[in-house]
Image (cartoon, grey):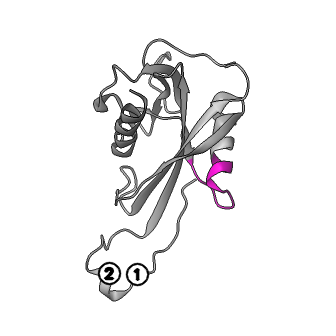
Amino acid sequence: MILRISLIISDQKLDQMETDINNFNIRVYAIIMKDSYYVLISDEYMMDMEMTKFPGGGLRFGEGPADCLRREAMEEFSQEIEIIRHYYTTDFFQRSLFFKDHQLISIYYLSRFTEPVRFKISTKPFDFREMKNGNQSFRWADLRKMVTEDLTFPIDRIVLGMLKKDCL
């Protein structure tokens, strides 16, 4: 579900903004680290496209961002996470890749599993039988070896740069 909020913009600011944007798409992601240098990433086939990103998803009406991330963790991992602290929120304009009339806002939280991992962690990208919408696999990626092109989306790439700066 996509969060839709109508923008109220003063005439003065309207000239400076993208006038065809009239909705927000708010996404919430977990940054889960292991052994100082490894971050959990998700390989997904969604909307007829391969994507590599941080685990997480879309905020629903009536949810706070932390609640959204906990729900997404249960949906994706079938296990709980603990949110350690806020890490980053988009601080620039980003048009949504999939919905051209939406502005994307992404929120990232440092998180950890409350119990040992109980789901499959792969060693190879896109570790599923077919490229079918909804398929997803997870893997630990070594921050020391990652480059921005390893992630699909622009905001994830910025967060990767921040993680490399903070962890290496």
**140 horizontally vs 71: left or right:** left
**From which residue to which does the magenta span run?**
58-68
Which corner quadrant holds the C terminus? top left
Q: Which residue is drawn at 50% across and 17% down?
A: 128
Q: What element carries label 2?
A: helix
The front one of 83 and 19 is 83
The residue pinned by badge 1 equals 9
16 left or right, relative to 36: left
Q: Mark 2 and mark 1: span between their CA atoms?
A: 6 Å
Q: Do labels 2 and 1 touch, CB within 8 Å?
A: yes
In the image, residue 60 lies in the stretch drawn in magenta = yes
Q: Is residue 17 above or below residue 74?
A: below
- Tag 1: amino acid: Ile
Residue 42, given in percent of the width and then of the height, sits at 49, 28
Write down the residue under mark 2. Answer: 13
Query: Residue drawn 38% across and 86% down?
Result: 10
Q: In terms of secondary structure, where does tag 1 sit?
A: loop
**Label 2 crowd (10 A; few <14 / some 14-19 / many >=20):** few
Q: Position of residue 48 (x, y in %)?
A: 41, 36
- Of 107 and 61, nearer the camera is 107
Amino acid type at image mark 2: Lys
Which residue is more in the foreground, 154 or 162?
162
User: What residue sits 68% from the left and 42% below the top?
Assistant: 70
Which image quadrant is residue 114 in? Answer: top right
Image position of 38 (left or right of 49): right
* Res. 152 mark: none
Residue located at (50% from left, 22% from top)? 36
Where's residue 102, x and y in %?
41, 61
157 falls in the magenta region: no
